[in-house]
């Protein structure tokens, strides 16, 4: 029996709920619903910019956010506030207008916002949505379509883009995805890449010799 510690068992039961929903003859796993939560958290608000700096792009120094916060959904914990900080270059260019930062490889920390299913539902999808409305993938899918942020074309596209990347990963793993979702994400014709074939290592042969160092004709050892 698997055991898992939790500071909020109510949240764990809710977030780990996995009904065997049938889509045609395929079973839709509960993690598909949680991917909707992850994408929704990404799109539900604009990042809170805490600091700006410079990053070198195409030979020029471009000012951009280097420290920010935004929501993220993490299945084992709940709805978090993710704090991201880019790291400054070890050696600062003398011609830069300010501090120059690395493009990637920053530091991320998470602070729990809430692990209450009803509060998560309300923050993500609106005041009328409750945790019980999001127990299945189609419940979460419908709630996403009705959310206030979904009415903004750029935020809806941000949601679809974030979800599409996650769904492609599941398709590559052979997981079933609802047809309705595939159609809206433009993945109805997607074909997962063929698994990479492992190269077999060539068998090394070594000649067997007697204790006196004489070669034994026709005898080899396979290593």
Image (tube, grey):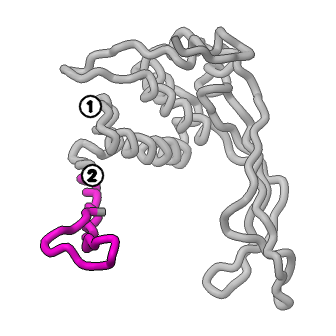
Q: Residue at x 60, y 41 (%)?
A: 42
Q: Residues within 10 Å of mark 2 (few under 14, many from 20)?
A: few
Does residue 147 appear left or right of residue 200 in this picture?
A: right
210, 42: nearer the viewer: 210
**What residue range appears in magenta?**
193-222
154, 42: nearer the viewer: 42
Vertical position of residue 105 compared to residue 7: above or below: below
Does residue 78 appear left or right of residue 161 in this picture?
A: right
Q: Residues within 10 Å of mark 1 (few under 14, many from 20)?
A: few
Q: Residue at x 81, y 64 (%)?
A: 52
Q: Quadrant of the C terminus?
A: bottom left
Kindly tell me whether residue 204 is visible in this rendering: yes
Kindly tell me whether residue 206 is visible in this rendering: no
Q: Residue at x 21, y 68 (%)?
A: 220
Does residue 102 appear left or right of residue 202 in this picture?
A: right
Q: Earlier in the sequence, mark 1 or mark 2?
A: 1
Q: Residue at x 77, y 52 (%)?
A: 68
Residue at mark 1: 179
Gap in Å between the C-alphas at discs 1 and 2? 23 Å
């Amino acid at each position: 029996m698997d055991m898992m510690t939790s500071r909020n068992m109510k949240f764990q039961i809710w977030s780990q709920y996995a009904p065997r929903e049938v889509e045609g003859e395929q079973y839709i796993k509960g993690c598909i619903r949680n991917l909707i939560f992850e994408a929704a958290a990404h799109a539900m608000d604009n990042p809170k910019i805490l600091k700006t700096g410079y990053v070198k792009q195409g030979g020029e120094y471009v000012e951009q956010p280097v420290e920010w916060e935004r929501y993220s959904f993490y299945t084992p914990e709940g709805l978090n506030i993710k704090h991201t900080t880019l790291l400054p270059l070890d050696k600062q260019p003398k011609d830069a207008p300010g501090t120059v930062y690395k493009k990637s490889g920053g530091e991320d920390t998470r602070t729990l916002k809430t692990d209450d299913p009803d509060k998560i539902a309300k923050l993500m999808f609106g005041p009328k949505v409750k945790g019980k409305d999001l127990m299945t993938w189609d419940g979460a899918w419908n709630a996403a379509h009705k959310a206030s942020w979904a009415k903004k074309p750029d935020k809806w596209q941000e949601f679809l883009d974030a979800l599409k990347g996650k769904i492609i990963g599941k398709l590559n793993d052979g997981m079933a995805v609802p047809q309705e979702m595939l159609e809206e994400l433009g993945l109805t014709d997607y074909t997962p890449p063929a698994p990479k074939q492992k190269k077999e290592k060539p068998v090394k042969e070594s000649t067997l010799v007697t204790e006196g160092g004489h070669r034994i004709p026709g005898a080899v050892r396979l290593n």
